[in-house]
Amino acid sequence: MFKNMRRQNKLMEEKKAKQLLEDGDYGVYCTIGENGYPYGVPLNYVYMNGSIYFHCATEGHKIDNMNYCDKTSFTVVHDYNIVGKEFDTHYESIVVYGRSEIIDGEEKRDALIGLINKYSKDYIAKGIKYIDRAIKNTTVVKINIEHITGKHGE
């Protein structure tokens, strides 16, 4: 179903790819819309329990596309370094394929707390209060991973 990476010598072990996914600062969430155009948007995320989670508004482009087609890809680039004299770029990247779904209940709250732990770990108590106030007006999307590929640079 998924193509093999062309340059197998750059293929990253799945364990390392998952670690980089956990450590990444942001990812690009890609969907396809009813108009047939792809849409990629950078966003904060958290990788936990074998899935990717992010939050967004209750309506908009991401939600419209996700409702049209739940298939997605998600890309994270890590350790990026341009090497001008070699006409090359050294980096590590992860591409995830999966299906998106809107979650609710305790899983939603846990994902939001996971985001606070990742991006605002010095403000956990304040973050939980914020979650409690805003959770009803926030959508949390879970990407159920079907395939993951990691690539390492030089």
Image: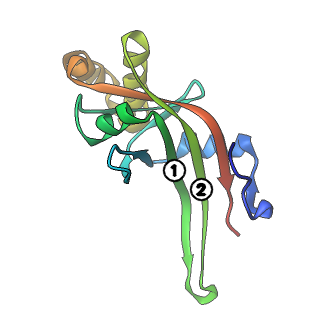
In the picture, measured across the screen, residue 31 lies left or right of residue 16, that is left
Image quadrant where residue 146 sits: top right
Question: Callout 1, which amino acid?
Answer: Thr
Badges 2 and 1: C-beta atoms under 8 Å apart?
yes
Q: Which image quadrant for residue 92?
A: bottom right
The answer to whether residue 12 is left or right of residue 47 is right
At 60% from the left edge and 85% from the top edge, which residue is drawn?
A: 87
| 91 over 20 or under it: above or below | below
Measured in 3D between alpha carbons, the distance from the residue under mark 2 to the one under mark 1, in whole angstroms, is: 7 Å
Q: Quadrant of residue 11?
A: bottom right
SS at mark 2?
strand
Tell me which residue sits at (43%, 38%) in the image: 45
| Residue placed furthest toward the top | 105
- Looking at the image, which residue is at 75% across and 64% down? 7
Residue 61 left/right relative to 91: left
Q: Earlier in the sequence, mark 2 or mark 1?
A: 1
State the image coordinates of residue 28 (x, y, percent, origin top left).
Answer: 43, 50
Q: How many marks?
A: 2
According to the picture, the residue beneath numbered tag 1 turns out to be 75
- Residue lying farthest to the right in this orientation: 9
Residue 97 position within the rendered picture, expressed as x and y whole percent measured from the top left = 57, 41
65 displayed left or right of 6: left
Up-down relation of residue 66 to residue 112 (above or below) = below
| Place of residue 1 in the rendered image (x, y in percent of width and height, measured from the top left) | 69, 42
Task: Residue 23 in the image: state x and y as whole percent.
Answer: 54, 44
Foreground residue among 35 and 92: 35
| Along the line of sight, the residue nearer the viewer: 24 or 147 | 147
Asked which colour scheme the image uses, the reply is: rainbow
User: Mark 2 = which residue?
Assistant: 93
Q: Quadrant of the C terminus?
A: bottom right
